[in-house]
Image: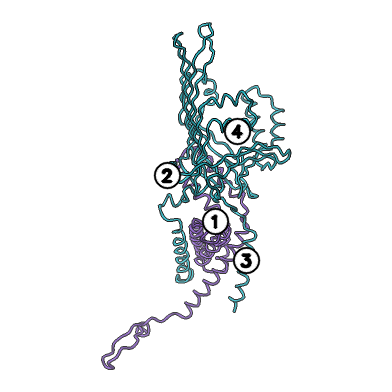
Amino acid sequence: MRLRALLPACLALVLLVLLVAPSRAQGSYDPSVFTPNGVVYELKGDFTVVLENRTENFMEERKGNITLVLTLFSRDQGGGYQAWSMSVYLEKFYYNKPEEFRTLLDVLRLNGIAIPPLVAVKEGTRETYFLVDFHQLKKALEETNVTGTGDLVALANKVMAATGEVNEEVYFMNPFFIPLDVGVGTEIIYGVYNKTSHQQLEVRLRIDDDGPVEAAGGTYDAWIIRMDEDEVADILAGLGLDEEGVRAIRSVDVKASIYYDKASGWLLGYELHSHATNRTTIEHEGRTIIANATGDVDVVFKLVEPGTVNVGGKTLLERTLHLPRNSGLAFSAGLLALSAYLGLRRPRGEA
Amino acid sequence: MAVLSALANVILGIILGLASGFFLLEVNPSLLGGEAAASIVALIVSSLTAGLSSRGAIRGCVAGALTGYLLFPTRALVLVFLAVINVGFRALSWALLANTMTAITNINLVFFAVGGAVVGGLAGYLASKLAARREEYPVEYYTEQYYEEYGASYPYYPEQEAA
């Protein structure tokens, strides 16, 4: 009889909890994309610029490469926001004219940096807000006159004081994930929006293809966005680049691709390869000469470790234990049974 | 001694409850009726597990409340920990792990604690009543024995024989 009376109470409780439970994710997004933890990307950049004039017996080569490792972390910011932070680690740096970078390297004197949460993703959307009060930051920057290291520390403290709360005035579309309900031909929106002034900068890129892409030690079925120099020039023209700049971009051979995992919508990588040849005037031994300039730039931003994001539809635990995802049901039921056994069979007072 | 025993019961309940909830949260949410429903099912199962093994309304209530409160932060921390193992134990990762741990203070988990306390309390109450009933009316175990003088098999009660 008492149990019968408890049933409505239990149902009411479940309803209450359902009503007040924080919505962890809605819509057509994989819930894991809002809370990335331990997600590692590798950014590799290579460039070569050769200036040459054979008749003057002149050749100058500048080349370099850099490998940066980025690790994403997130935490619950409250109010339906997930704050994202990252660490950046310089794994490799080479430039054949090191003296030009000596000052910069001397200033940095470190090969890694942890960046505190500066942006927060609104759950269920791609809207990403800054955790920076720009008005307070502007005021702090105006008030501080940097003349030495002590001032730099003071400035850093003031900048940090302006961070922490979600600034709902300005947001941008998160480039790290896309919705799940997309297909070939769907436009993916990238942009920055100001809710107060209603200003916006928006770029729409179309999914051109799908296919297997290698990333994070596996092959994943991916959506592919491809761009060439004309598309890049059109985008930059739309963003306000002048005509001369647009013409310069069109003269460069550009191939860019963006890959998103089909199962989770998570970014697998960006690739940019460009090649350009041009004629330019330079100063050589006090004379102005015309030289052929050849430049190659390759930038690859690639997912190395998916962390807690369900890339390929697999959870971190699945990847770690190599067990099917739903085997968790069996583990959970087993533990419940063990608990019931302990509760009912164990003599009273025994731990 | 009784206090220590109760404490051990509660701790065991919390550990079992958190483990069962953690594994349930790893299951595909569509199997449990969606993301929000999966959270609720995980909360109910974890606090039920905690309450049952705690055995006792008060113990179950305490174990259920703590399990409900700690379920989501524990899950997040375990996953972060696993991710950090995969990434490598760089100092920077640890700095960010510490930052992530502050997340616990930001989540509104009171509702989960209340829900866990109610479910855990009920489970503990039921477990204690059922266990008490078992002690009050123990099941008599018997075996069949063949009696030659009667030429047939009859139940044999070893406990009665011993008495």
Q: Is residue B112 above or below residue B127?
A: above
Chain for colour cyan: A
Does label 2 lie on the same chain as label 3? yes
Q: CA distance from mark 3 to mark 2?
A: 45 Å
Q: Nearer the viewer, mark 4 or mark 2?
A: 4
For marks 4 and 3 on the same chain, the one whose residue lies earlier in the sequence: 3
Checking the image for residue A238, the label placed there is: none
Q: Secondary structure at mark 3?
A: helix
Position in image of residue B58 (x %, y %) = 57, 67
Residue bearing the label numbered 2: A219
Q: Is residue B90 above or below residue A291?
A: below
Position in image of residue A286 (x %, y %) = 53, 6
For marks 3 and 2 on the same chain, the one whose residue lies earlier in the sequence: 3
Position in image of residue B10 (x %, y %) = 52, 62
For marks 4 and 2 on the same chain, the one whose residue lies earlier in the sequence: 2
Q: Chain of mark 2?
A: A
Residue bearing the label numbered 4: A235
Q: Is residue B159 above or below residue B102?
A: below
